[in-house]
Image (cartoon, coloured by chain):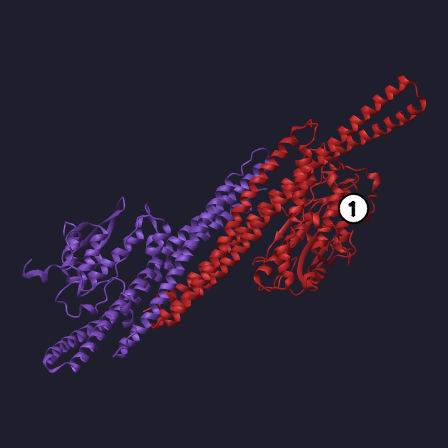
Amino acid sequence: MMLLCRSASFSSPARCISNEDQEPEYDTGDLDSDDGEEIFTGTSNKPFVSTPPETDPSSDIFSEEGSYTVQKHTAPKTNGVQSDEELDLFAEATVELTLTAPNSRGRKEIIGPTEPLSTTVNTHGKLHVANTSNKPSEEVEEEESGDTFELNIAVTNPEKMGDGMNAYMTYKVSTQTTLPAFRSKTFSVRRRFSDFLGLYEKLSVKYNLMGCIIPPPPQKSVVGMTKVKVGKEDPSSAEFVEKRRAALERYLQRVVSHPALLQDSDVQEFLEREELPRAVNTQALSGSGFLKMINKASDAVNKMTIKMNESDNWFESKLQEVENEEQLLRRLHASVDSLVNHRKELCSNTAMFAKSVAMLGSSEENSALSRALSQLAEVEDKLEQLHQEQAFSDFFTLTELLADYLRLLGAVRGCFEQRMKAWQRWQEAQSTLQKKREAEAKLLWSNKPDKLQQAKEDITEWEAKVGQCERDFERISSTLRKEVHRFEKEKCRDFKHHIVKYLESLLRSQHRLVKCWEAFLPEAKAIV
Amino acid sequence: MGSNEDSAQSVNGSSIKITDVTQDGDTLTFAITSQKSSSSAGVCVFRTYEDFEWLQQGLFSQEDVPGLQGVIFPPLPSKPLPSTSLSQAKALKQLGFLALGDEWMIYCKALELYLQQVAAHTTLSKSKALYSFLNSSESPGKQCGKKGILNRLSQAMEEMRKEGHKDVDEFFQSERDSSTNLSALFKLSTEKFLDVVLNKQRLALACGHFSTSLHLCVNQDNPTAVAFSKICLKLSDIIEAVKINYEKVSDNDISTLGLGLDLESRYQEAKREMLFRRTCKLVELETANRNSERAKPNKKAIMEGVQKATQKEFDIISSVAKQEIEHYHRDRVSLLRDFLICWCEKQLSTARESSALLSQHLDACKKFAV
């Protein structure tokens, strides 16, 4: 089966794939291009890199807008607010879906009864895979009409299992995909929070040394979870669960939007396998633990005795950029947080005002005035609801976006530090090699043939190690560069998408507000 | 002045306007223009708050107005506290909504309404004090004012128990009950509305901070950074629009419903005070009746005289009060109606404007190439 890359939902036209563009990083000999299955299955230590180093990224087909789209579409009502409409989890799949294997039946399987807190958010993760070997052009044309692979993920239906302090929440992870790597087109599993953390741990162990930017998982929260465990059915624990559910969903969406991770067997297992072994050692990955990890790495780097000789200024200036941006986002996050709090306050103040006006309305003797006041109380109630929804929108659209990116930037910084460590290892290997050579030279003079043999073997061994370190360093550098590039583009898209979403929610609010006032005006005029 | 005092031309109530206010240190001076109903010639005078207090005292202390105690006096707003010397919180506590708004505009509006209400009152409009106030070039407040028979100092503790004194007239008893009830409710609603409005102002401020922070996200290093900067600036514009919207919404709140609720609250109080005065008179009458009954023969005639006089006063007061209450009910409903309509119309128009602006932003955003 042939695999094809292609631009998707953005308006940029699909480019005609010509043979010259295909320059995959890895040896095509590793993969049998006739059997598409193998591309996806099996662990591979090599990252799936999208752009061959020599090509100018902008002309490369992979860096087209469509390639790594992760779109989030919300239903008209925002997260956390009960939607009256029965919504298809994947309702806003683009046209692409219908072009591929018939999915309508599959889609319906996903639609379960939506519980109040279930998501109405869906996503697209599109994978566009390189044509791994040169193909004659007529075959290429054939491929263009067919195979676009998709993967949509939704996290829904939080359920509390167990009792008391041993209780935990599980979430339904539903996948809808056309990728052949998976056993079926639509499937779902139940996962708990520690499973997500376990996945992150596995991925970071595998990919950290590659320079890949691994999306960090949502934060642990002892306070939040304790409330849920204790069984308090109050709005704040409901809010907490919804916040976590949405965060887990975004986490998975980011994971699958990364082309290398999508192919990873651990990721696929996570999505597909019925029962996962309990993940342990996830203590380190609480929110503060994660940051500690990153900061420990930077401390180690700062203590480096050999100052890194940066042959390429790009890395130095880019790291500075990342650090600046982190600071900026932190400030923005604090701003939006305060905005959300003010809105919540406005909610409760509006509710109190509405109540006091209702009391007025019922005590007022003039009947028209009384009715108008009662109407006013209702208007204010509606306003309260609007404020509430707007607060949620602020929160989920903006605050969480900023929080996510703060963590992501931390991960990016971590990658830079990994690269510096790789450089350090290389330097250390070189210095060890040097020492071995000096030892050999000494032995040559002192004429101890048996030790000399050992020394020569050492030198060979360390020459190989130096070579390996150098290759590792080169590889991590080039991967990191591409990853950063990919990340920045993704960030742009993500932010733009969220701003549009935010604007749409603002606009909806305003429309409803207009309707409220329009309804009230005749009541006011009717007072005599 | 002469026997033609009565024909001193009455002022056209609706022509009274406060056209300007200047602040000198802690003192505010108001420019008041008015016209007589018979001519189009206008008069402009400058008055301070002391002058207004003088006017109010003057109205209270009019002699030879029968049943004056039955009049519901238009309420004078509390003394303005220029915020240079005091914190905003204190000003809010004292003045409520009247402390808000730009440049004392709301406060001036409240004073204006006060003067208009005095001028519209059949009895009060004839007072000399009003005439002096509106026309005299000298500031009347400088003159020593007579202490009014009616002192608006807060009720002493012993007076409080009179408040609950049972009435002889069902109409008045029910008016007193509903007044107490409604007065408390209106006061509560006004306070809650003030909380809402202040909250909206804080929200606008928070939006401003957020918008400013976004402006710092400018980075020209590479095309993607440029694109990201543009996105941030766009969001900044949007949040700025949200902020301006909230400012407008809260201004609308203050200048219409806020002012209306404040006025209504104060008018309720004025009505309660009138009813209280009448109740006090009732207590006085009942005391006089008892005295008259128990009086020793040598004092009996005097006591009966007092009793008759008090009865007469009470009856006049009651009849004036009844009229006043009817006017009050009619006027307040129409006042509230006007304020509610104005509020609704302003908010509707602001919401529509905001909708249109956000719509434009949305279109621009969607077209934004990333």
Q: Quadrant of residue A352?
A: bottom left
Res. A11 visible in picture: no
Q: Mark 1 lies on which chain?
A: A
B249 is higher (above) or lower (below) than A330: below
- Given residues B112 and A295, the one toward you in this image is A295
**Residue at (63%, 34%) from the top-left corner?**
A319
Q: Residue A35 placed where, x, y %? A: 83, 47
Q: In which quarter of the image is residue B197?
A: bottom left
A321 is higher (above) or lower (below) than B97: above
With A316 as the anchor, is A271 left or right in this view? right
- Given residues A64 and B341, the one toward you in this image is B341
Q: Mark 1 points at which residue?
A: A2
Q: Quadrant of the N terminus of chain B?
A: bottom left
Q: Quadrant of the C terminus of chain B?
A: top right
Instruction: Sort mark 1 into few (<14), some (14-19) or many (20+) by Cα contacts within 10 Å.
Output: many
Q: Which residue lies furthest to the top in this view?
A: A445
A74 is higher (above) or lower (below) than B161: above
Query: What amino acid is found at the position of numbered circle 1 in the picture?
Result: Met
Res. A408 visible in picture: yes
Q: Residue A386 placed where, x, y %? A: 49, 59
Q: Residue B307 placed where, x, y %? A: 15, 77
- Given residues B10 and A486, the one toward you in this image is B10
**Residue at (29%, 53%) from the top-left corner?**
B107
With A32 as the anchor, is A57 left or right in this view? left
**Residue at (51%, 43%) from the top-left corner?**
B234
Shade of chain B as shown in the rendered figure? purple
Q: In which quarter of the image is residue A475?
A: top right
Shade of chain A as shown in the rendered figure? red
Q: Residue B85 placed where, x, y %? A: 32, 46
Count of numbered labels shown in the rendering? 1
Question: Which element type, helix, strand or loop, lies under badge 1?
Answer: loop
